[in-house]
Image (cartoon, rainbow, N blue to C red):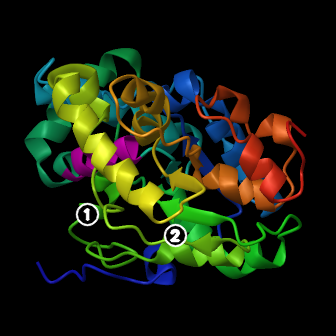
Amino acid sequence: MNSPRVITPQERLGTKPEKVFLFRSCTGSMEYPGTESAIKEVLKKLGIEVVMDPDQTCCSGYILTCSGHTPEASLAVTARNLSIVEQRYAGLDMFCFCNGCFGYNTELSHILKHHPAYMKMANEVIGQWGYEYKGQVRIFHVQELYYLLLDEIRAKVVRPLNGLRVASHYGCHYLAQQYGLLDDGDLPTFHEEIFEALGATPVFYKERRMCCGYAVGRGFTHKESVVQPHLGRKLDSAKEEGVELITTTCPGCNVALDREQNNLAARGFGPYNIPVIDLGQLIGLALGVDLDKLGFEANTIPLDGVLERIGLGKGA
């Protein structure tokens, strides 16, 4: 393969889209619905129309990873979801806001497009309900769109983050890309560039590239005794650097880093009390999106201190 591993956002995406198809995340919808809401509000402020479709289903990646079914089932699910974009929203690119959805859709669509037998099999399955996938949909992560529009985001900040010490959790499903990554997978910095554009202070902590250890692991295959010390090590590293807020680009990572903090404290780790939100929620906060559309009430670790820090007052 001669494809470059690291490319610019312009090479990756091209020009700013007028309209995008947003792929719903099942974990995001169930656990952190404010994530989806925040992303739609941010894109609206950036002049981008968002479309979604009620017929879209889960990407099925969790079940596939746990060997809950054979790959053929997930290939058919992927083909059906992407055919919805092709058939109903011709010409639109699909954007994911979950690293898992992004990773599975990207990998499985690659298999479909490069292995005619699998494409034929998937289309025979979904064809029973009138769907057909031709392999024409481009798949991106919404964080890539933020980086493409970084200057525009910087110009639209109305709530500067006043030096808030923010740390990133990039997530393994995105950094594991072999080609077309926006940044060096070993030492990415494009999230930190976004933090600075919002007026925050980026914090580099030792374990920032460490996987959250959760998603499939904590939920299905690994014991708490394996995953929780792993999480504790990551959060210890953030606490040592004085991190006030962590951002993710995956609702599954949010579940691990936010929901598990109380469980960790019960086992003698921490306490940490570091709020964890999606990068889109952070951008929405700085761009003046109404707090009731950011969904912070779904957090286990409250954001009262963060809101006070940027002058919004407790619970405002």
- Residue 283, disc: none
Q: Is residue 306 above or below residue 159?
A: above
Q: Is residue 1 above or below residue 144?
A: below
Residue at position x 48%, y 51% from top?
249
Q: Nearer the viewer, residue 142 or 263?
A: 263
For the N terminus, give its image quadrant: bottom left
Q: Is residue 292 above or below residue 234?
A: above
Boundaries of the magenta span:
99-110
Residue at position x 24%, y 38% from top?
229
The local crowd at label 1, few if under 14, some if 14 to 19, many if 20 or more residues have their Cα within 10 Å, is some
User: In this figure, which residue is indicated by the disc labeled 2?
Assistant: 191
Would you say residue 111 sits in the magenta stretch? Answer: no
Residue at position x 28%, y 72% from top?
185
Disc 1 to disc 2, C-alpha distance: 17 Å
Main secondary-structure element of the magenta-colored stretch: helix
Image-based side of 108 in relation to 94, left or right:
left
Picture coordinates of residue 170 (x, y %)?
40, 59
Q: Amino acid at mark 1?
A: Gln
Q: Nearer the viewer, residue 230 or 254?
A: 230
Q: Is residue 25 above or below residue 274?
A: above
User: In this figure, which residue is indicated by the disc labeled 1?
Assistant: 177
For the residues carrying marks 1 and 2, which lies nearer the camera in this image?
2
Would residue 61 be visible to someone looking at this image? no
